[in-house]
Amino acid sequence: MSLLVGIRVIDAASFVAGPAAATVLADFGADVIKIEPPGRGDSYRDRSGPDNPQIDVNYAWLLDNRNKRSLALNLKDPAGQDVLNTLVQQADIFVTNLPLPVRARLQIRWEDLQPQNERLIYASISAYGEQGPDASRTGFDSTALWARTSLMDMVKPSPDSAPSRSLPAMGDHPTAMSLFGGIMAALYQRERTGLGDYVSTSLMANGVWWNGLQIQAMLCGGRYRARPPREDAANALQNLYRAEDGRWFQLACNPEDKHWPLLLGVIGQPDLAGDQRFATRAVRHAHARELIGILDECFASRPWSAWQESFAGVGLTAGVVQTLEDVVADPQMFASDVLTPLPPTTDGPTHTVNSPVWVHGAPKVTPRDAPALGQHTDEILREAGLSDDKISTLRRNATIQ
């Protein structure tokens, strides 16, 4: 049986990080009720921006809202708030990432909902944290996670380059996993105390955690060295190289002293062991540019597949830089259930991206299609105890759809 069967979740979030956290809960069997405004639904249903792949399948909605039920409910209407309060009284977890001022207007803050259900776990994602001067500011992963925490600056290819641009949702999905972890910890605490709790994370906090080694160095008084171009990397044995067939790969010789003679054997340059420029780790680093030039010439002599076999034969670590086309054809992705099967359809995709954690004694549920807007409205409200007459009145007043 799946781990979270019997747990009911209200997903009152929008776009990516909050809904994605609820999706992971649904993957493990939780009953997730996705609340959306009638009419247009969650804005995330529209992913028609120019940076996104232009295909007929609503791939973003499929990924981040699978295994959920949709309730189209107007939370701006007092009658809609009454319905929500009824659902909260029966729920285990409430997930939101709406801006703090919006939560106040809709009366969906922790202090609004907790008195109605002392066992409720309130799970919150914000852009910049919930205290401080920027607590009420809006933000996306590109601004709060990538830009604010220096990640865009840190991963640019050279000091003179413009900051690197992130792609949509790159930081949202890992942030969703942070919230999922907090929710699971709160469920464990509830087993001990009988009480719910307030769980929170932020896009900014996750970006700082990603960049934690560099930021901790600065906190300890270190000085940041601008990231040089590949040809001037500080360590030639931890660098990108290009094979004869044009494929780039990341070489990662660690521990370096142990792997240096193995690398010399692979590239057929044993004489370099006696070259005083490369005799110790310190001097190899001092002469890294020269060594990179030698390795560039060596690695350009054979295709990646040949180098991959040679590296594996002696236990050296290297990884090809895959394209998206490579990823969706990678047999390891399928064998390890990273790309997991969808139920057969006539014209839809055959697989979806799995959530990145497994509890091997509690299998996940089979992925189901993300819901249509209001697909389960009547079903959910009847389960909550509302009569058909009450449901009809709510629909007539445009409180539900």
Image (cartoon, rainbow, N blue to C red):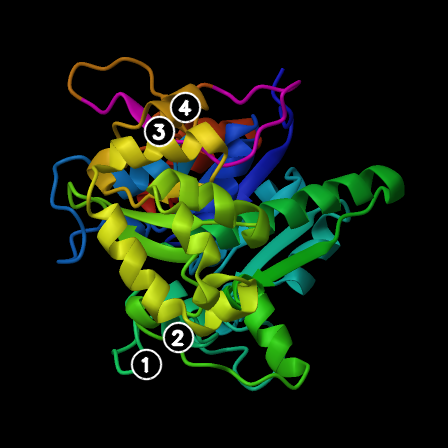
Q: Give the vertical position of 30 relative to 215 (above or below).
A: above
Dot 2 amino acid type? Arg
From this view, report whether residue 365 is shown above or below residue 169: above
Residue beneath label 2, please? 227
First in sequence: mark 3 vs mark 1: 1
Residue 79: x and y, percent? Answer: 48, 52
Residue furthest toward the right?
193
Circle 2: element type: loop
Measured Cα–Cα span from mark 3 to mark 4: 36 Å
- Of callouts 2 and 4, which one flags the residue occurring earlier in the amino acid sequence? 2
Q: Badge 4 local density, few (<14 within 10 Å), some, or many (20+)?
A: many
Instruction: Looking at the picture, tell me which residue is in the foreground, 216 or 229.
Output: 229
Q: Which residue is mark 4?
A: 367
Label 3 belongs to which residue? 309
Disc 4 versus disc 1: nearer the observer: 1
Provide the major secondary structure of the magenta segment: loop
Relative to the observer, which residue lies in front, 133 or 316?
A: 316
Marks 3 and 4 close (CB-CB < 8 Å): no
Secondary structure under tag 1 reads: loop
Q: What's the CA distance linking mark 4 and mark 1?
A: 44 Å
Check disc 1 and report the residue beneath it.
159
Whether residues under marks 2 and 4 lie with C-beta atoms below 8 angstroms apart, the answer is: no
Q: Residue at x 34, y 70 (%)?
A: 289
Amino acid under label 4? Pro
User: SS for tag 3?
Assistant: helix
Q: Nearer the viewer, mark 3 or mark 1?
A: 3
Q: Residues in magenta?
A: 348-365
- Few, some or many C-alpha atoms within 10 Å of disc 3 (few <14, some 14-19, many ≥20)? few
